[in-house]
Amino acid sequence: MAVREILKMGNPLLYQRSEEITEFDAPELRALIKDMFDTMAENEGAGLAAPQIGVMQRLVIFSVESNPRYPDAETVPRTILINPEIEALDDEREAGWEGCLSIPGMRGVVSRPSHIRYSGYNEHGEKFSREVSGFHARVVQHECDHLDGVLYPMRIQDIRQFGYETALFPDEV
């Protein structure tokens, strides 16, 4: 198991746009994906973007079955998403609490499109597409933001809805 260090907010790499992946089915890509899943699991994450471990490539992973950080979240299938594209399918938006492994111990309310289509490639270079909503849509958008150098606090509209989990949810922590 190779758990990598997660970069924290303030690291300049987290504010840069990542590069497209052009080589699929490569041993280096398989190793990176394995390390990302190991790192996400070790930190009880719902998703992880390659830039969060200092790899500036357009790769995100996500998976939620049961997660103590998101006890009420619906299941999100184990997904490897390379060179993603996201399209909002309507004008409906949903505000919800988000956290991030690069900003430990904090949460903030972010408004995002609630129904999206995302597409991209798996590790074998096979193109796929899914229409999703709810928590699944939020996770995908949050992780894909990392590929463009965007952290969720940059999307918070009311800074009073951003803070430490221990202060925001004292009975849950």
Image (cartoon, rainbow, N blue to C red):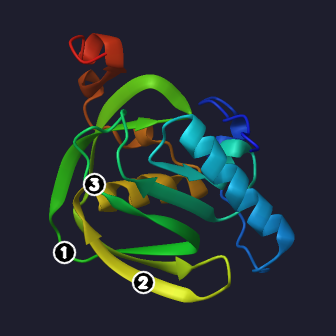
Left or right: where 118 falls relative to 102: left
Q: Position of residue 161 (x, y in %)?
A: 25, 27
User: Mark 1 = which residue?
Assistant: 90
Can I make out residue 16 in this image? no
Residue 74: percent from left, percent from top? 25, 54
Mark 3 falls on what kind of element? helix
Taking the image as shown, residue 68 lies to the left or right of residue 114, namely right
| Precedes in sequence: disc 3 or disc 1 | 1
Q: Amino acid at mark 3?
A: Phe
Q: Which residue is mark 3?
A: 135
Q: Amino acid at mark 1?
A: Asp
Residue tagged 2 = 129
The image shows residue 149 at horizontal and vertical percentages of: 59, 50
Q: Amino acid at mark 2?
A: Ser
**Nearer the observer, 86 or 64:** 64
Local crowd at mark 3 within 10 Å, few (<14), some, or many (≥20)? Answer: some
